[in-house]
Amino acid sequence: MEIVCFALYAYTIILFVRIIASFITQFRAPPAALGPLLKVLYDLTEPVLGRVRRLIPPLGMLDLSPLLVFLLLAVLRGALGCR
């Protein structure tokens, strides 16, 4: 059970980092050294976010899919009794 809780917590952190990276890269191009890291972030989060986007499409420039995924992760952690 602890492994599942850790995985949910780790995915929450990965999703948060992806959101910050996405916000920063909108204003300027990332350094070339960060390219592989950004690809890993997108590869880990896009399958989940893409499915949620099919349910809730972006509202103009505002993408609400990460918010729903954060909510679902919190509900899962609470249901499993994770700290």
Image: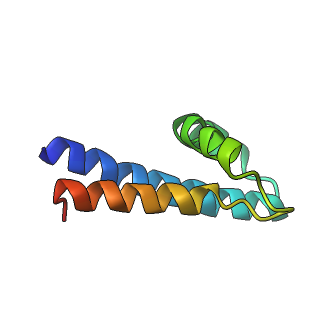
Way the structure is coloured: rainbow
Residue 64 figure quarter: bottom right
Residue at the left extreme, as displayed: 1
Q: Residue at x 52, y 37 (%)?
A: 44
Residue at the front extreme, as displayed: 55
Q: Residue at x 69, y 56 (%)?
A: 22
Near-viewer residue (17 or 58): 58
Near-viewer residue (36 or 8): 8
Q: Quadrant of the N terminus?
A: top left
* Residue 69 x/y as whole percent: 51, 54
Residue 6 is left or right of residue 65, and the answer is left
Near-viewer residue (9 or 80): 80
Residue at the right extreme, as displayed: 60
Residue 5 is left or right of residue 54, and the answer is left
Q: Residue at x 40, y 49 (%)?
A: 11
Q: Residue at x 58, y 57 (%)?
A: 66
Q: Quadrant of the C terminus?
A: bottom left
* Residue 71 x/y as whole percent: 45, 62
* Residue 40 x/y as whole percent: 55, 36
Say whether residue 60 is visible: yes
* Residue 36 x/y as whole percent: 61, 36
Say whether residue 33 is visible: no
Residue 6 is left or right of residue 12, and the answer is left
